[in-house]
Image (cartoon, rainbow, N blue to C red):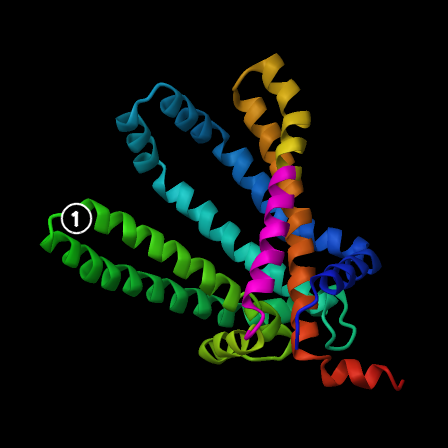
């Protein structure tokens, strides 16, 4: 099936509007709250890191990161898991597998979390193996002709291209896990790869437009809302706190829209589920 980006966007926005109250609640809990918590508890650390970077003191920056590594990793991993549950729950809520309540959507998200974590582990291992293999092959060959630096640059370029392609091919993993009930991580990855077949370039163009739109809106909103605060108060803790609130709110809305877009993209390429077909005859 040929992917229709206009239809995917229209359907996604319709789904968000139809469920905006409950989606805002889910977004507040799983996307905005983790950002606010990390901002509140890490404001002092972030301020010190920004001052160290502004003063061009890498040794001080490394010391600050080393001293607060546990705190940084804790909030980082905790926020990542919370956002995973959020994406899974939002997808369950606006998907076409019946009409789950908010509580049922969260339970579905929690049940699907181990599969998504397993996919993340598999993806991380694959990236590490690809990085090692490319480095050994490409850099090794370029070293033989005395151009090791050029080989390193080529490895970075090839990895970026490979990661971009893989991100498109595996972009439908969350809807596959939630809407199709595929729990095996390898099967979920294979299913996403199959669904995106012959539509990779269209999907890449669509995702690129969405990303550019997000960055443009985030930049303008940050400039308008955070800029005056920084002009008055400088780059202190209050400015960082305001920036965290603004970034968290923008990120929460963007995450909800992204989950809706991926859900409707999956529905378009995979076709409606049996539950959705049954609803037509109720």
In this view, 247 is above or below 58? below
Whether residue 170 can be seen here:
no
Q: Is residue 162 left or right of residue 206?
A: left
Spot occupied by residue 126 in the image (x, y as percentages of width and height) = 34, 67
In this view, 73 is above or below 269? above
Q: Quadrant of the N terminus?
A: bottom right
Of 96 and 241, which appears nearest the observer? 96
In this view, 275 is above or below 80? below
Whether residue 34 can be seen here:
yes
Q: Is residue 204 left or right of residue 282?
A: left
Q: Residue at x 64, y 35 (%)?
A: 246
Q: Is residue 47 magenta?
A: no
Spot occupied by residue 228 in the image (x, y as percentages of width and height) = 65, 18
Query: On the image, which quarter does residue 171 sit in?
Result: bottom right
Q: Which residue is mark 1?
A: 148
Q: Which residue is farthest top?
A: 232
Of 275 and 26, which appears nearest the observer? 275
Q: Residue at x 53, y 78 (%)?
A: 194
Query: On the image, which quarter does residue 85 sit in?
Result: bottom right
Spot occupied by residue 18 in the image (x, y as percentages of width and height) = 84, 60
Q: Main secondary structure of the magenta part?
A: helix
Spot occupied by residue 276 in the image (x, y as percentages of width and height) = 78, 80
Secondary element at image label 1 = helix
Q: Residue at x 69, y 48 (%)?
A: 253
Q: Is residue 30 left or right of residue 18?
A: left
Of 155 and 181, which appears nearest the observer? 155
Q: Quadrant of the C terminus?
A: bottom right
Are there few (<14), some (14-19), or many (20+) residues within 10 Å of tag 1?
some
Specify start and end residues of the magenta stretch as a single range: 197-216
């Amino acid at each position: 099936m040929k992917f229709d980006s206009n239809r995917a966007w229209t359907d996604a926005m319709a789904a968000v509007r139809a469920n905006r109250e409950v989606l805002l609640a889910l977004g507040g809990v799983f996307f905005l709250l983790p950002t606010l918590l990390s901002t509140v508890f890490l404001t002092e650390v972030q301020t010190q890191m920004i001052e160290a970077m502004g003063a061009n003191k890498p040794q001080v920056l490394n010391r600050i990161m080393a001293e607060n590594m546990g705190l940084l990793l804790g909030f980082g991993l905790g926020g990542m898991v919370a956002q995973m549950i959020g994406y899974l729950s939002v997808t369950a809520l606006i998907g076409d597998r019946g009409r789950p309540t908010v509580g049922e959507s969260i339970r579905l998200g929690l049940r699907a979390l181990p599969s998504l974590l397993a996919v993340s582990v598999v993806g991380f291992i694959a990236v590490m193996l690809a990085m090692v293999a490319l480095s050994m092959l490409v850099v090794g060959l370029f070293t033989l002709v005395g151009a090791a630096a050029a080989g390193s640059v080529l490895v970075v370029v090839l990895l970026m291209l490979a990661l971009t392609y893989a991100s498109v091919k595996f972009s439908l993993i969350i809807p596959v896990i939630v809407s199709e009930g595929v729990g095996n991580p390898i099967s979920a990855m294979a299913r996403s790869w199959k669904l995106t077949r012959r539509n990779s370039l269209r999907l890449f163009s669509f995702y690129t437009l969405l990303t550019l739109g997000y960055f443009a809106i985030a930049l303008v909103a940050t400039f308008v809302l955070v800029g005056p605060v920084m002009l008055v108060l400088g780059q202190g803790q209050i400015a960082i706190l305001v920036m965290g609130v603004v970034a968290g709110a923008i990120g929460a809305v963007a995450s909800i829209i992204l989950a809706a877009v991926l859900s409707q993209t999956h529905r378009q390429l995979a076709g409606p589920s049996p539950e959705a077909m049954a609803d037509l005859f109720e």
